[in-house]
């Protein structure tokens, strides 16, 4: 019995797409289309600062220009407050949530550095507050809401998974993360919770995204288990990095789609370079997304992702490649 592959684009409308976003989107799209699956588009605009419909529409226009289509959506996280609230109620009913009154400075001072990524492990400061203490502190400060993770010695709190590109991973939640946020003190739903609820309700069974999000997987799997959701397959694709090893950013204007579209009539040159970097196209080949569908294979991508591959940026100012495609020691994301 085969199950239809259902993947997703899940962009945050914080600015114009750049080549790194395009690469992750291309891989997600090819992984779905090569299996005859279905693609869902979800706009991750939960944070009021990311609630920028005009940026989201520009992003959708960029996806269409690239030839990366979708079958369902867009869904807007900013409109889905009810489903997140329901999930929080279910966790609350299990007695797993508690209010956290820590300020940013207190968190910083009381926490141990994260084992692998330099973000901070929550020390459990507010875990044992009495109802009277909670009532008293609530008069001074609106609390965030945290989810208890099992003790370090409890096997339930060690999450193991196999990523299609990065291989086997294991994380002990208590040691590497601590009790984590499901709702911020300003009431905004935390990224991890929203993603888990959305992926489950949208039937997503394959998550392909940049490997800056590899560090989120253990928390997401833990939430899936608590909420009784199926676990999708994960593939974290390499990030594009500059020659000095830093992540691409909006400062790399040559790699911004606004800039690329101003110079290139179509997406074939950019897609050709991205595909070449992971062994799906020949050097100098110009190609459209549809033509890559039959060539796509996780084995080829994985083999190329394991070594540093030069991604020749479509720069007009220089003949030198201005960025590399690399996998491996990427910083985990602390969202
Ligand atoms: Zn706290």
Image: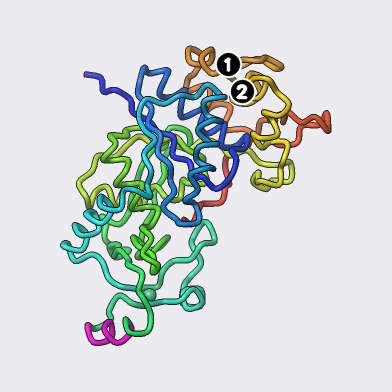
Q: Looking at the image, is 135 positioned above or below residue 66?
A: below
Residue 209 pos. (x, y %):
47, 38
- Residue at point 57% right, 31% down? 23
Q: Which residue is mark 1?
A: 288
The boundaries of the magenta stretch are 131-137
Instruction: State whether the magenta stretch is mostly helix, strand or loop.
Output: helix
- Which one is nearer the viewer's eye here, 5 or 315? 315
- Which one is nearer the viewer's eye here, 245 or 273? 273
Cβ(mark 1) to ligand 1 < 8 Å? no
> From the image, which quarter does the N terminus lie in?
top left
Q: Check contact, mark 2 vs mark 1: CB within 8 A.
A: yes
Mark sitting on residue 309:
none
* In-image side of 40 versus 228 (left or right): right
For the view shown, which residue lies furthest in the right direction? 318
Magenta region includes residue 136: yes
Residue 203 pos. (x, y %):
28, 34
Q: Which residue is mark 2?
A: 271
Badge 1 local density, few (<14 within 10 Å), some, or many (20+)?
A: some
- Residue at point 56% right, 24% down? 66
Q: In the rendered image, which quarter is residue 255 located in?
A: top right
- Which one is nearer the viewer's eye here, 56 or 289? 56
Structural distance between the alpha carbons of marks 2 and 1: 7 Å
């Amino acid at each position: 019995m085969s199950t239809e592959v259902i993947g997703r684009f899940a962009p945050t409308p914080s600015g114009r797409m750049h080549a790194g976003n395009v690469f992750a989107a291309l891989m997600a799209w090819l992984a779905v289309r090569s299996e005859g699956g279905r693609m869902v588009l979800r706009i991750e605009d939960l944070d009021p600062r990311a609630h920028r419909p005009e940026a989201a529409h520009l992003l959708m226009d960029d996806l269409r220009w690239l030839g990366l289509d979708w079958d369902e959506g867009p869904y807007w996280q900013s409109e889905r407050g009810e489903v997140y609230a329901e999930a929080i109620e279910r966790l609350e009913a299990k007695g797993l949530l508690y209010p956290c009154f820590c300020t940013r400075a207190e968190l910083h001072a009381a926490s141990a550095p994260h084992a692998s990524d330099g973000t901070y492990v929550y020390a459990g400061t507010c875990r044992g507050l009495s109802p009277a203490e909670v009532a008293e502190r609530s008069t001074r400060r609106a609390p965030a809401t945290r989810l208890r993770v099992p003790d370090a010695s409890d096997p339930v709190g060690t999450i193991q998974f196999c990523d299609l590109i990065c291989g086997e991973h294991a994380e002990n939640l208590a040691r590497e993360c601590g009790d984590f946020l499901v709702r911020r003190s300003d009431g905004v739903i935390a990224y991890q919770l929203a993603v888990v609820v959305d992926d489950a309700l949208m039937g997503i069974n394959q998550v392909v995204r940049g490997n800056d999000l590899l560090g989120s997987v253990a928390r997401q799997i833990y939430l899936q288990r608590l909420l009784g959701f199926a676990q999708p397959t994960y593939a974290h694709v390499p990030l594009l990095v500059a020659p000095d090893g830093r992540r691409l950013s909006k400062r790399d204007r040559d790699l911004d789609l606004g800039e690329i579209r101003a110079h290139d009539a179509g997406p074939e040159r950019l897609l050709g370079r991205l595909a070449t970097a992971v062994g799906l196209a020949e050097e100098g080949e110009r190609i459209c997304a549809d033509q890559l569908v039959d060539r796509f294979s996780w084995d080829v991508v994985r083999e190329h992702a394991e070594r540093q591959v030069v991604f020749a940026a479509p720069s007009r100012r220089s003949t030198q490649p201005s960025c590399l495609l690399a996998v491996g020691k990427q910083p985990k994301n602390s969202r």
